[in-house]
Amino acid sequence: MPTRRPSVQREYQQQILLRWVTTITYRMITVGAILFVVGLAYLLYALFALGDQSSYSAADAGRIQGNLTLFGRLSLLGAGMVVIGLAWNYLEEEVVGFILVLLAV
């Protein structure tokens, strides 16, 4: 009994889909890295420049607290995007893919 091979068209479609997904994950890694760096930069700025909160009014302190929360979440979102993108791209690697999948969870 002859074995059935997938058609050339089906293989080509699978390659196009894989290339498309890989391109999206590389862009996701780039955007995630930018978000992480921006969030981390603001958090470090707030840590060193806004240390003396006794001179701020209650409204300013609330605004600063809101900004810290926003940029902290932004940094976490960026880190998550980087880890998920790397996990997808290196999923078939035995050690790296497994470690990145664990970090993504």
Image: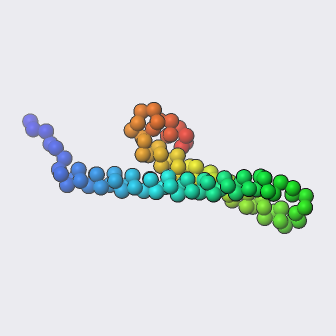
Q: Quadrant of the C terminus?
A: top right
In the drawing, does residue 93 fall left or right of residue 5? right
Q: Quadrant of residue 49?
A: bottom right
Residue furthest left in the image: 1
Report the side of 6 relative to 33 (left or right): left
- Picture quarter containing residue 72? bottom right
73 horizontally vs 33: left or right: right
- Quarter of the figure with the N terminus: top left
- Regarding residue 74, the answer to whether it shows in the image is no
The residue nearer to you, when weighing 93 against 14, is: 93
**Residue at the image point whose x is 19% and y is 55% from the top:** 9
Task: Pinpoint residue 11: horizontal percent, then vertical percent.
Answer: 23, 50
Asked if residue 104 is positioned above or below residue 13 in the image, the reply reads: above
For the view shown, which residue lies furthest in the right direction? 54
In the image, residue 35 lies at what x, y percent?
Answer: 59, 57
| Count of marks placed on residues | 0
Question: At which x and y percent is residue 3?
Answer: 13, 39
Residue pictured at 67% horizontal, 55% vertical:
41
Q: What colour-coding does the image apply?
A: rainbow
Residue drawn where x is 30% and y is 55% of the image: 16
**Residue 83, visible in the rendered structure:** yes
Q: Is residue 61 rendered to the left or right of residue 103?
A: right
Q: Residue at x 46, y 57 (%)?
A: 27
